[in-house]
Amino acid sequence: MSAGPGAGRTAVSIPAGDARLEGELVVPAGAAGIVVFAHGSGSSRHSPRNRMVAATLEEAGIGTLLVDLLTRAEEKADRLGGEYRFDIPLLGGRLVAIVDWLRRDRGSPLPIGLFGASTGAAAALVAAAERPEDIAAVVSRGGRPDLAGPALRRVRAPTLLIVGGADEQVLELNRRALALLPGEKLLAVVPGATHLFEEPGALEQVAALARDWFLRYLPES
């Protein structure tokens, strides 16, 4: 898959407190908005699953920002037994910094969406709660929205939770989280899919669901 017409891939370095986060920004001509990807535990901006979803969004005319939420040093420490990847306040704060960077440093007026996978979904919901005026829509893929805690009740952006039908424990956690979200919301179940949506056609369903959700809500912002 390739980026949409008029799109270029730009390497970016985003300040977030004492850290700098590395990412790749794609903004197609006439983009409906920009979706920031929040990867899950043990993953990065190079995740083939997130890149596949991002390519689908780009082809639909939606900008994407794939960014590492941890620095290289933090990722290394995490592999040695650290817990950065499960530090939802840290990851949520990093996403807030990214949103602020898009608005302040890039001066982007485009609506912003968030796509979170696994623990990244909780971070996305925390950021949506902290920046309700900036976040137009949220999509979670196999996420742990329950880890967002009290922030769930403060999310105002339309939120789509996508879960595999065979991912029973996570599905139940998503059902509970859905009940706490106060705004427009939907739980979409991909039949027969497990946590990583590795079954034939499953990830394509995720990408199509995310694309349609963002196309519905980003232009309205």
Image (cartoon, rainbow, N blue to C red):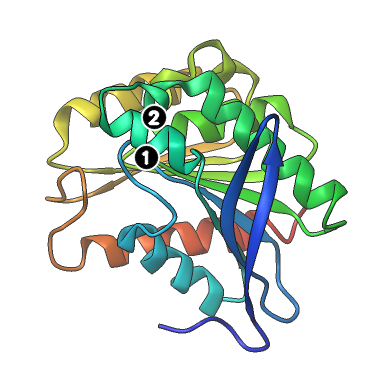
User: In this orientation, which residue lies closer to the viewer: 161 or 22?
Assistant: 22
User: In this orientation, which residue lies closer to the viewer: 206 or 12?
Assistant: 12
Whether tag 1 and tag 2 are in contact, CB under 8 A, the answer is yes
Tell me the kind of residue under disc 1: Gly
Q: Position of residue 184 (x, y in %)?
A: 58, 36
Residue at the location (58% across, 17% down)?
A: 151
Q: In this view, does 54 lie to the left or right of 197?
A: right
* Residue that carries the numbered disc 2 in the rendered image: 85
How far is the residue under mark 1 from the one under mark 2?
7 Å
Residue at the location (47% across, 65% down)?
A: 54
Label 2 secondary element: helix
Q: Position of residue 140 (x, y in %)?
A: 43, 42
Mark sitting on residue 50: none
Q: In this view, does 60 lie above or below 195?
A: below
Q: Which class describes the residues within 10 Å of circle 1: few (<14), some (14-19), or many (20+)?
A: many
Mark sitting on residue 40: 1
* Residue 1 visible in the current orientation: yes
Tell me the kind of residue under disc 2: Arg
Q: Position of residue 94 (x, y in %)?
A: 61, 33
* Residue 135 visible in the current orientation: no
Q: In this view, does 167 lie to the left or right of 54?
A: left
Q: In this view, does 105 lie above or below 1?
A: above
Looking at this rendering, what residue extends furthest in the top direction?
150
Earlier-in-chain disc, 1 versus 2: 1
Residue at the location (12% across, 41% down)?
A: 166
Q: Which class describes the residues within 10 Å of circle 2: few (<14), some (14-19), or many (20+)?
A: many
Label 1 secondary element: loop
Q: Is residue 84 left or right of residue 205?
A: right
Closer to viewer: mark 1 or mark 2: 2
Q: Is residue 106 above or below residue 15?
A: below
Residue at the location (12% across, 50% down)?
A: 192
Q: Where is residue 50 in the image (x, y as percent from the top left)?
A: 39, 58
